[in-house]
Amino acid sequence: MTTPANSTAFSGEVWAELRLADASDVPHIHALIHQMAEFELLTDLFAATHELLTSTLFPSPPRPPLTSFTALILDLSPSPLPASADSTIGSCRLDLSASPLADPEAAAFASPRGGGRVTAGFVICFPNYSTFLSKPGLYVEDIFVRAPWRRRGLGRMMLSAVAGKAAELGMGRVEWCVLDWNKNAIDFYEGMGAEVLPQWRICRLTGAALDKYKGGQEESGKAAAE
Amino acid sequence: MTTPANSTAFSGEVWAELRLADASDVPHIHALIHQMAEFELLTDLFAATHELLTSTLFPSPPRPPLTSFTALILDLSPSPLPASADSTIGSCRLDLSASPLADPEAAAFASPRGGGRVTAGFVICFPNYSTFLSKPGLYVEDIFVRAPWRRRGLGRMMLSAVAGKAAELGMGRVEWCVLDWNKNAIDFYEGMGAEVLPQWRICRLTGAALDKYKGGQEESGKAAAE
């Protein structure tokens, strides 16, 4: 059963595709990042703009996928989607016949790919490096699904597809971060085979604390921890 | 006072330079990574080879520094070093007149740059990405200094120089990881202006747990945490 994208109700079968993003997806990526900032109560840190997203995620000439910052888009379609060898990373089918789904933002998130598709989420990832393995890995900075589409297996499909791609590329690891109080997420990730490292903490130098290192280098040594 | 590199004793003034590495540094980088694995009691994870390091860190054509995986070398010189605009990232001078330094591995770590220089440490770093800032940052995977050269300010010089470079490039953050029980390192990093994030944990999918995602994608949805 098909459901037009400008409707707020989805029922029957819906086809999900995780695909490489392009510059036409920037407005939706921007809006999704803002929703993520609201969800994490971090809108004060939100400084993304269409211009910055375009220049950092979609430079020209384009880079091969997963060799640098890479954006992926989750589109949902009321009709089956032919997988594109060029851009499809993962896919799954949702059966909503038992519980129709209302998406009040469906019209605002109409996918630039057309065909009644609706954009429901995104992934940002980039290569990292393991010195011991001397191999690239993949770091997943964000996986986000809009509220009405959560708890239907889309996060699992997205992370599985990204992990599959990393494994196929011969990468040694896939890594991401989770908040230590988010037990549901930790259980979910452990169920997918991930190890949650208990002892490592992230150190961050940013803003004025980072800027003070600009141009200046220490000219004489003091005792250092390294 | 000059000290030949094949001696084990350094005294007087010594000039330290943090510089971009090249493929001729691979044997020393490999040996330093092995020392780091021994220090961290993780030699069972050590799988680095000269071939893997060369192909992943020094591909041809070369990439601009800090746009992908980047290796930096810490060289110590018995005579002043002219800074090279092309490759010098940071420098400092050590005054060893009060406490001469014995480096039993000085001959084994003679720098390929010659001039009596000795390689004493390395940095591996690569760009990461902040979605909220829509900007690249820099992730420091490793900073390592050989044992005789520790606690003389070289770690501070290296991290300051890397942070300065990131700030000059307009990057939004410098990040790295620390073990939560390593109070000395945490105090040192906080003293440099870094924030240690208490709540984030690293999730890692590797080895057989990663390989099982190869080629396969979930075809139907299950409840997901995202």
Image (cartoon, coloured by chain):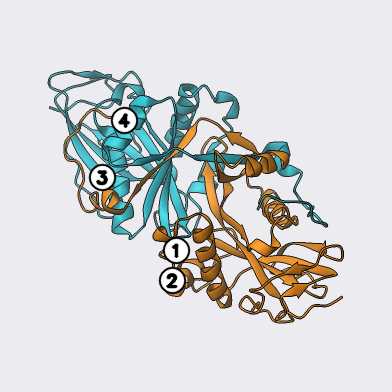
Chain colours: A orange, B cyan
Above or below residue B42? Residue A8 is: below
The residue located at (48%, 72%) in the rendering is: A54
Residue type indicated by callout 4: Asp
Q: Write down the chain letter for disc 2.
A: A
Residue type indicated by callout 3: Gly
Above or below residue A174? Residue B207 is: above
Cα–Cα span, label 1 and label 2: 7 Å
Cα–Cα span, label 1 and label 3: 28 Å
Mark 1 vs 4, N-terminal side: 1
Please tell me in which quadrant of the rendered image residue B29 appears.
Answer: top left
Residue hosting label 3: B90
Please tell me in which quadrant of the rendered image residue A81 appears.
Answer: bottom right
Residue hosting label 2: A49
Residue hosting label 4: B187
B198, A136: nearer the viewer: B198
The residue located at (16%, 28%) in the rendering is: B2
Residue hosting label 1: B134
What is the x, y in percent for residue A200?
49, 33
Please tell me in which quadrant of the rendered image residue B11 appears.
Answer: top left
Residue type indicated by callout 2: Thr
Circle 4: element type: helix
Q: Write down the chain letter for disc 4.
A: B
